[in-house]
Image (cartoon, grey):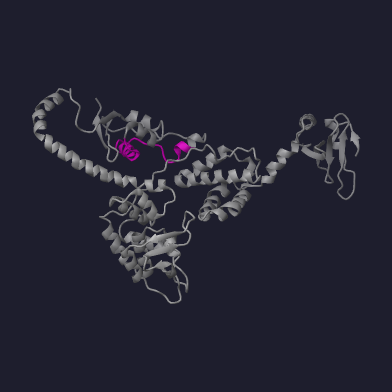
Amino acid sequence: MPAAKFRQDTLRTLRYSGSNNAQCIYWDEGLPGFGIRVFPNSRKSFVCSYRVQGRKRLATLGRTDVLTLEQARKKARGYLGQVADGEDPKAHDESQNASGSVKKLTEIYLERHAKVKKRSWRDDESYLVRYVVPKLGSRLASAITSADVAKVHAEIGENHPYAANRVVEILRKMYNLARKWLVVPIGMQNPAVGIERFHEEKRRRFVTSAEMPQLAKAINAESNLFVQNALWLLLLTGLRRNELLKSKWTDVDWKQRTLVIGKTKNGESLLAPLSRAAIARLKAVPRLQDNPHIICGSGRGRRLTNLNRPWNRVRTAADLTDLRIHDLRRTVGSWLVRDGASLHLVGAVLNHKDQKTTAGYAYFQTIDRQKVLDKHGRRVISSARPALKRADTGAAKSSSDGGSESANAPKITFTRKKLYELVWSAPVSKVAITLGISDVGLSKACQRANVPVPRRGYWAKINAGQEIHKLLLPVQPGSLDLVTIKRGYNSPRTSISNSL
């Protein structure tokens, strides 16, 4: 290859010499390994040639119309310095490019992990296709940062905070596996780690005793007998929807009153017990000669695959539009606990692999304990009534003088401006805990007092470094300015008093 003494003003005079697109490089006489590659179309790029670990490498530093000669020489010296330390300057760039795009990484994750090890892999696919690929799909997987993920999390969380949390969980798992598979550099920091999640409320909805008659009436009004019986069986057995829909008549042991579930959500087989009411309901299900399934679909030999549309009809007719089909399973657990069944037994009935899942039903045991304590309290007060009557006069006098603590629930009083400053200083859930009330109660208090609160996704955007404008505190007509909140987790009360 020809050698030349490079000068900025003579670079344009270098011409391509060669045939059949052969490589043409002019080497610098002043810096060994530094050169300019000229392409047949006259485009030129600075290059650096070096040898590391017995391997000859040629790195492109940049085009001559982008970098100056001095900038390229400085970059070349940096490359050669790394080579002297035994490093390959090109390895980092190659490892980044080898990872491919985020879209490619999502495809690898779904094929190598989600579809193989997760029964709910379609949910992962849906989250990635709907939220991640449109926003980050064309970017290099190895170039994604925590700020990128935080921004996506905040944008999704404006309308779907729970979905935003699921997306972060999937991305964290995906990048952990990508490092293990060497799809991204092993030393790369997981961009989904350290993202603050949106607050999630545990769902405790179940069918109450008062609601059961209207739900039963709506189920019995369903014209499709297979749907009607499926919903009754979900209420009577506590099975998951797909566990029931996939069941066949050969899985039923009529004598032992059991139903064999092949593979459940937790990956284990289950021998589900059947009550006499469930057996009676099973006997009422029509049996089709050419269909082995208990809950049959419209196709010949097919099972029913989707209960969503008929369930929407049923819950609308029952005026229980907030009731989800999975709440029928939760109803079984809650009713069993209220009837005195232990959490361990309820976990066995519902096939919970993790007892923490069943522990959520301890809420209903708390209600029962409260009822017992209420009864105990009434007896104590009844026994002590004579002494309490004698003390009433003195207590009333002391109260009128302001020297006695009120028997009512404690109150919190502050100005609307102070309440406004509190709810804009931290998430409502955290402020509520500090005040000793529920977040729902605090939100209602603000609504009654005409105090605006941050919209959903506000704090996530703040954490992501975005600049968000606060809603201004509206002027209250008249002189209403003091806000009084009665503490009480279940039903906080709020009143607005005249400013003093």
Q: Is residue 2 left or right of residue 261?
A: right
- In front: 437, or 52? 52
Name which residue lies at 36% across and 70% down.
285
Residue 220 horizontal/vertical position (percent)? 31, 66
Residue 4 horizontal/vertical position (percent)? 89, 33
Q: Is residue 139 visible in this depiction of the protein?
A: no
Q: Is residue 192 left or right of residue 455?
A: right
Residue 132 horizontal/vertical position (percent)? 55, 47
Name which residue lies at 41% across and 64% down.
259
- In front: 464, or 360? 360
Considering only vertical position in the picture, is 81 above or below 20? above
The residue range painted magenta reads 437-460
Name which residue lies at 82% across and 38% down.
54
Considering only vertical position in the picture, is 373 above or below 391? below
Residue farthest to the bottom, as pictured: 289
Considering only vertical position in the picture, is 203 above or below 401? below
Q: Is residue 219 visible in this depiction of the protein?
A: yes
Name which residue lies at 42% across and 75% down.
288
Which quadrant is the N terminus positioned in?
top right
User: Was residue 459 drawn as part of the magenta stretch in this picture?
Assistant: yes
Q: How many marks?
A: 0
